[in-house]
């Protein structure tokens, strides 16, 4: 008798006991005398069900969760018998939360063994690269442009244009840099894909290298992600052994190799030029643009720098999927976005879907409201530089332009839900405080303005000269918005001003701003 | 819990020699120093500066710029509690206050007996199983009062 089970190795699953469950399963198997094969996968992204354990059956993989060590024996027996269990969820692929998604980038995440390049290849892995090798530069650039892919790191810049610029710049050395700094609170898609399907990131970077003529790549991973660092390092080694990295990529005339570099706890190093400074071994001071990294990037050489999810979208696009990709979405937001639903939610996790759902559908319907059961009051979209949305704006469709039109941003698609116990003046204060902590210090509005912002909001919170101090905060926000070199200082006003505008009662100023509208 | 070696110039030289031929070797070297010694000892700075033909001030500037690099050894255990928004939304503020009370120090400090360094961290990417923490290298999610208390007790041991 034998049994194969799948237990995530994803950090979020490990943080709630997945490793202990794997150990407990081994023990039960030994006791029952059954040969057990445990495959440590990534996460399917239904974080409220983690640790979610799946068993292979003739009808497909059957999921159980959230599992605890105490459940291990009864789960094991139910799995062996293909019988009922209170934690039995059903066939994993048929679970409604998964079925409603359009998984293009995350299709293998939680499914395959992230340590096995053979498993990756058995799930369409490296088909995109092989086709890219036959297409050459122009064909690749055509596909990337046609797909409509825009950078998933936050700014939404068209990826095809960026790659074309680097391809057209001649140099003795070019670089591919993957931005895996994922500093935005409420986001974890980069982490999940690195841990659950690292080869898709490597393949995307390799295709970029072939397209623009770059032979070296770096993936800069934040130090807060030790599991992702291990997973990427293991995958890079495996790709090298299999001949997909090295002097002759996939047997072609193209050379491309890459390595992991680890950040050191600076949020601003997610900003692309700061990241390049950091890779070069300096303080992460933001560079003035121009020159663009595409012209003078890492070590002054032409450099493609993209977010993890941008690279991870590429293999699907190059595997004949460019048109299909572009047919998803709305307006100028094409394709799918891996939403990350977090904070005080009933159903949190990763939900990949075409652009265009409304914020209300995401929060009320997909996330199922709060886990505290209290009403949703505010939703911060796009990380610490993103605006807070009140219920009144829940009709905003998830789309770059629609969010910008409402003084917000989708950023890296982190969605953090707060219930009605939230104090929005405290959240505004935190936005300023975070900016003060993380400012690279290059521009005065960001460095000094944020500290003044904290002090002034403290006065407001104490009820001191509320109207006058609100005016000071608005002034500071204006100065920061227009006088900052990068979006850390420039966008911190979004959470602050949105809190003031939509939740004035939390600042002891009931109607002032509403009246001004 | 990590066991660190006492400062040793030959060990530091060995680290530098192993890594200095990398492109952009400064951060890898500093990480390796911290992994070996638990912090970046002051005497390592002129050694790194010389090997990379930088000024001492430049190397010092790099060490102080990044939150990760320590100029002093930390406590025996390092407990990091996520203080970013998703964890705030899930009750993180109250947990931070509870941990401060249990440890008898404000966040950002080390207990007087040198056992625990308690630090804020801004997002561990575990935002859908919030609130989150990390004890040395181990991640812990879905914190509530009892899970936090157990973690603090473990850290203090
Ligand atoms: C303060 C700040 C932090 C940023 N953090 C990240 C990050 O963690 N990851 C990321 O991909 N982009 C981040 N960005 C955006 C990058 O500067 C850049 O736009 C992105 O890496 C480009 O890749 P993309 O076109 O694929 O999005 C940040 C920007 C700023 C201003
Ligand atoms: S806005 Fe802030 S983080 Fe950005 S360059 Fe200026 S000082 Fe640095
Ligand atoms: S905000 Fe705490 S883990 Fe992301």
Image: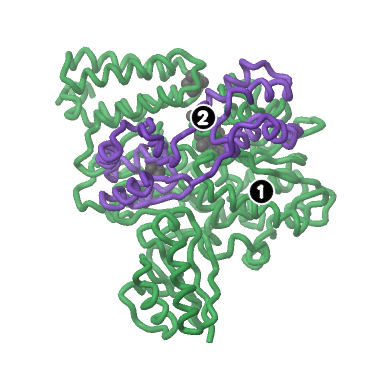
Chain colours: A green, B purple
Does residue A170 lie above or below A477 as drawn? below
Does residue B98 lie above or below A437 as drawn? below
Work out which residue is located at the far right of the displayed protein and give it: A253
Q: Which residue is mark 1?
A: A143
Element class at badge 2? loop
User: What is the distance, in whole Å, between disc 1 and disc 2 at their CAs?
Assistant: 46 Å
Point out the image quarter for the C terminus of chain A: top left
Indicate the quadrant where residue A368 lies: bottom left
Element class at badge 1? helix
Q: Is mark 2 within 8 Å of ligand 3?
A: no
Q: Nearer the viewer, mark 1 or mark 2?
A: 2
Number of residues whose C-alpha sits closer than 10 Å to that of mark 1, classed few (under 14), some (14–19) or many (20 or more): many
Q: Nearer the viewer, residue A131 or A452?
A: A452
Kindly identify which numbered label has been placed on residue B70: 2
Residue A438 picture location, percent across and down: 45, 26
Residue ID at (64%, 55%): A199
Number of residues whose C-alpha sits closer than 10 Å to that of mark 2, classed few (under 14), some (14–19) or many (20 or more): some
Residue ID at (27%, 17%): A456
Q: Is residue A497 left or right of residue A166?
A: left
């Amino acid at each position: 008798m034998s049994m194969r089970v799948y237990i995530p190795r994803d950090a979020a699953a490990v943080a709630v006991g997945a490793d202990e469950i794997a150990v407990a399963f081994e023990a039960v198997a030994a006791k029952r005398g059954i040969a057990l094969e445990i495959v440590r996968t990534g996460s399917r992204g239904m974080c409220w069900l983690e640790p979610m354990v799946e068993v292979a059956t003739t009808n497909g993989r059957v999921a159980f969760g959230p599992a605890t060590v105490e459940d291990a024996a009864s789960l094991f027996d139910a799995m062996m018998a293909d019988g009922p269990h209170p934690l039995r969820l059903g066939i994993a692929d048929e679970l409604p939360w998964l079925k409603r998604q359009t998984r293009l980038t995350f299709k293998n995440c939680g499914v395959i063994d992230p340590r096995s390049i053979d498993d990756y290849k058995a799930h369409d892995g490296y088909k995109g690269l092989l086709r890219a090798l036959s297409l050459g530069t122009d064909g690749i650039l055509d596909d990337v442009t046609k797909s409509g892919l825009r950078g998933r790191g936050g700014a939404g810049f068209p990826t095809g244009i960026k790659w074309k610029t680097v391809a057209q710049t001649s140099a003795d050395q070019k670089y591919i840099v993957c931005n895996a700094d994922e500093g935005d609170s409420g986001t974890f898609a980069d982490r999940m894909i690195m841990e659950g399907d690292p080869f898709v990131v490597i393949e995307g970077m390799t295709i970029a290298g072939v397209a623009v003529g770059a032979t070296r790549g770096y993936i800069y991973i934040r130090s807060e992600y030790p599991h992702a660092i291990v997973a990427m390092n293991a995958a890079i080694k495996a790709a090298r052994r299999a001949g997909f990295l090295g002097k002759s990529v996939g047997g072609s005339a193209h050379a491309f190799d890459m390595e992991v570099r680890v950040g050191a706890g600076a949020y601003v190093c997610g900003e692309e030029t700061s990241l390049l400074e950091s890779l070069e071994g300096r303080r992460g001071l933001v560079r003035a643009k121009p020159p663009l990294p595409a012209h003078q990037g890492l070590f002054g050489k032409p450099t493609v720098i993209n977010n993890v999810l941008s690279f991870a979208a590429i293999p699907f696009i190059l595997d004949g999927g460019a048109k299909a990709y572009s047919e998803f979405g709305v307006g100028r937001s094409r394709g799918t976005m891996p939403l990350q639903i977090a904070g005080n939610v009933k159903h949190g996790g990763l939900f990949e879907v075409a652009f265009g759902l409304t914020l209300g559908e995401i929060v009320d319907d997909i996330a199922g409201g709060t886990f505290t059961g209290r009403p949703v009051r505010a939703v911060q979209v796009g990380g610490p530089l993103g605006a807070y949305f009140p219920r009144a704006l829940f009709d905003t469709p998830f789309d770059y332009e629609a969010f910008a039109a409402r003084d917000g941003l989708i950023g890296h698609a982190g969605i953090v839900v707060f219930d009605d116990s939230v104090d929005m003046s405290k959240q505004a204060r935190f936005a300023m405080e975070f900016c003060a902590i993380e400012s690279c210090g290059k521009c005065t509005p960001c460095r000094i303005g944020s500290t003044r912002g904290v002090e002034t909001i403290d006065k407001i919170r104490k009820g001191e000269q509320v109207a006058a101090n609100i005016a000071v905060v608005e002034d500071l926000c204006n100065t920061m918005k227009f006088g900052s070199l990068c979006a850390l200082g420039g966008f911190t006003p979004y959470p602050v001003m949105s809190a003031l505008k939509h939740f004035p009662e939390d600042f002891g100023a009931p109607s002032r701003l509403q009246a001004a509208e | 819990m990590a066991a660190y070696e006492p400062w040793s110039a030959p060990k530091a030289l060995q680290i530098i020699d192993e890594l200095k031929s990398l492109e952009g070797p400064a951060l890898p070297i500093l990480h390796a120093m911290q992994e070996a010694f638990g912090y970046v000892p002051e005497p390592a700075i002129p050694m790194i500066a010389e090997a990379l033909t930088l000024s001492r001030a430049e190397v010092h500037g790099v060490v102080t710029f990044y939150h990760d690099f320590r100029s002093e050894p930390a406590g025996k255990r390092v407990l990091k509690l996520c203080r970013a928004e998703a964890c705030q939304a899930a009750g993180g503020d109250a947990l931070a206050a509870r941990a401060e009370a249990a440890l008898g120090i404000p966040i950002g400090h080390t207990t007087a007996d040198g056992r625990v360094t308690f630090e804020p961290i801004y997002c561990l990417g575990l935002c859908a199983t919030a609130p989150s923490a990390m004890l040395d290298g181990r991640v812990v999610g879905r914190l509530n009062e009892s899970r936090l208390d157990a973690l603090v007790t473990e850290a203090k041991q």
